[in-house]
Image: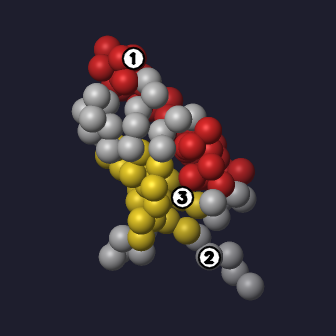
């Protein structure tokens, strides 16, 4: 979907998985900003979390970003956890 495409364009090499709690988890297999994330992880990770929230907003808030679970940027594998909001018919 839109979120996977946005993360692909940024170079994160994402893959999407459904979780038992009804969430969607994007595993970000590469960190294109690893050196910056090592220096200032709060700024870099918050920027990408904000970018994901912006993409979610473009869907008419059909996607809600729950959290970004950080990993060591040299190994990547950060998790972006989302859930879908079903519009009222």
Q: Where is 54 relative to 60, above or below?
A: above
How busy is the neighbourhood of tag 3: few (under 14 within 10 Å), some, or many (20 plus)? some
Task: Name which quarter of the figure residue 64 lies in.
Answer: bottom right
Pointer 3 and pointer 2: residues touching (CB < 8 Å)?
no
Marks 1/2: CA distance? 37 Å
Q: Quadrant of residue 73?
A: top left
In this view, the mark in front (1 or 3): 1
Q: On the image, numbered disc 2 is attached to which residue?
A: 86
How far across and down, in percent of the image, does residue 63 sit?
59, 61
Q: Secondary structure at mark 2?
A: loop
- Neighbor class of circle 1 (other Cα within 10 Å; few <14, some 14-19, many 20+) is some
Residue assigned mark 1? 36
Residue drawn where x is 40% and y is 37% of the image: 30
Disc on the earlier residue, 3 or 2: 3
- The residue lying toward the viewer, choosing from 32 and 45, is 32
Position of residue 44 relative to residue 82, above or below, is: above
The structure residue drawn at horizontal position 62% and vertical position 44%, both measured from the top left corner, is: 6
Q: Earlier in the sequence, mark 1 or mark 2?
A: 1
> Quick check: 64 left or right of 43?
right
Instruction: Give me the residue at 34% from left, 43% from top.
Output: 78
Disc on res. 64: 3
Question: 43 or 16, which lies in front?
Answer: 16
Q: Identify the secondary structure beneath mark 1.
A: helix
Instruction: List the single residue furthest toward the bottom.
Output: 89
Mark nearer the N terminus (1 vs 3)? 1
Q: Position of residue 46 (x, y in %)?
A: 44, 32
Q: Mark 1 touching mark 3, by CB under 8 A?
A: no
Please say if the residues under marks 1 and 2 sit with CB atoms less than 8 Å apart: no
Q: Secondary structure at mark 3?
A: strand
């Amino acid at each position: 979907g839109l979120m996977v495409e946005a993360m692909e364009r940024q170079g994160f090499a994402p893959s999407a998985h459904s979780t038992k709690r009804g969430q969607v988890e994007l595993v970000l297999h590469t960190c294109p900003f690893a050196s910056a994330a090592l220096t200032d992880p709060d700024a870099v990770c918050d920027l990408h979390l904000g970018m994901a929230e912006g993409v979610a907003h473009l869907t008419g808030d059909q996607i809600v970003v729950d959290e970004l679970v950080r990993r060591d940027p040299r190994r990547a594998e950060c998790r972006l956890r989302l859930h879908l909001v079903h519009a009222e018919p």
